[in-house]
Amino acid sequence: MKTRSITLYVNGEAYSLNVAVNRTLLQVLREDLGMPETKYGCGTGECGACTVVVDGGKSILACLTLAATMDGAKITTAAGLEKDGKLNPIQEAFISEHAVQCGYCTPGMVMKSVSILAKNPKPTEEEIRRELEGNICRCTGYVKIVQAIQKASEVMASTR
Amino acid sequence: MSSRILPEFDLLVPQSIPEAVEMLGKHQTKAAVMAGGTDLLVLMKAGLQSEYVLSLSEVPGLDYVIYDPQDGLRVGAMATLSQVAENADVKKYYPALWQSACVNGTPQTRNKATVVGNILRASPAGDCCVAALALGGKVVLQGAAGKREVDIDNFWVAYRTTARQAFEFAVEYKIPAKVGKSAFIRMTRVDQDLAKLNAAVCLNMAGNICQGARLAVGCVAPTTVRVQKAEELVKGKEINESVLNEVAAAVGAEVTPIDDVRSSAWYRKEVSGVLVKRTIEKACA
């Protein structure tokens, strides 16, 4: 087949799409669904800018995923984290800890953080750094990013 | 050719193993089999053309990692590196494979990339490849006529070439039980880079005496290789400093590395023996 009819659940909304089979999930999110928050960085799995979360906790790279093979998948992007107009604690922490410089890596960093804390609500600094290995920040603001994830972890623990 | 846009192809999405076998039998070399896609899609963005891509994503029952104390470990074609890295039995009984799965790629690629895919890629730098060669075991291939098993020792026949026939797909990699003490170490320029050198060992120990060893090295030949002269040096011996130094001195003569972007032939020849020595020490620790 050259095209495939699929249903994607993005940030809780169902989208019925007929996608060309050679289109990546990243292209479909950005270009077909008009959701530019997931970024194109390298396109070859090196940088993590296109990180999205599947099924509530698993981080994957949208640039190395064929949309046609994701029929029925539940995808969360950075724009899907706020609830009732209120930012997610991870987003709040990225702001309060000044973990954003140019901002290009930020949606991927935030989505990676979602998957880190979903798997391990109280990660050590070492664990955070290991898990962030696939996300590149060329402003090199890693210290603030690590601090933001630690802050979010504390906030989420106290409100749980 | 673009890192943004994939070339055109026809997608095949079989819903069962028999359907996958039938499709592969029909298209053979025209079809590229895709498990996680983290490697294939990068290759295609770099210019690899394939008329068909056969995705295993909807074939049920291939994403298992099963350990049995008698039969050993079975890793299904769709089992990801993350699944292997999170498996307590792999960590306990096959540390070389566990350690390789923990560092291969990045957390995101490990959530999709598979151990079987890493073995099939047949790259001499594959982290799971060197672990698999040290641990031994077999790749299970399935075609229309049924299954056959190929020893990992005979699986890589040349650079990026395997014993898999075009009409077969790899359903499983399996390792016997009680393979012995094992470990893996790799060297990279930066953490998530491909290895410039990697090594894995598996030692069958009786007390302090090594009854047999499989010593594997990557990035030093067209395929991942065993250094069998070095294996002979530890066989029947107590693992001590002088034996380890003999091994370290012997490995370089057995390997045929090249210069490339990640390292030089000279460096690889000099250092591979030390890496094997340290991997043996790690396995025995």
Image (cartoon, coloured by chain):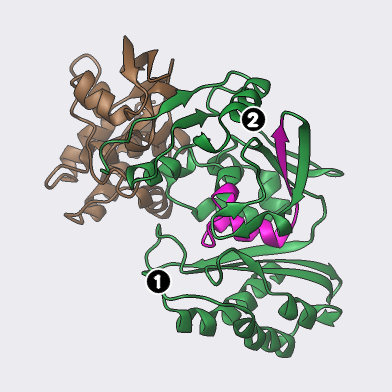
Q: Please tell me whether mark 2 or mark 1 is closer to you in this view.
A: 1
Chain holding disc 2: B
- Mark 1 falls on what kind of element? loop
Q: Is residue A15 above or below residue B36?
A: above
Amino acid beneath label 1:
Asp
Residue at horizontal 53 percent and vertical 57 percent from the top: B123
Query: Is residue B131 covered in magenta?
Result: yes
The residue at which mark 1 appears reads as B260
Residue B1 vs B224, above or below: the answer is above
- How far across and down, in percent of the image, does residue A12 sit? 33, 13
Which hue is chain B drawn in? Answer: green
Magenta residues?
B119-143
Mark 2 lies on residue: B62
Residue nearer the viewer, B223 or B81: B223
**Residues under labels 2 and 1: Cα distance?**
36 Å
Give whichever of discs 2 and 1 has the lower sequence position: 2
Answer whether residue A26 is magenta in the image. no
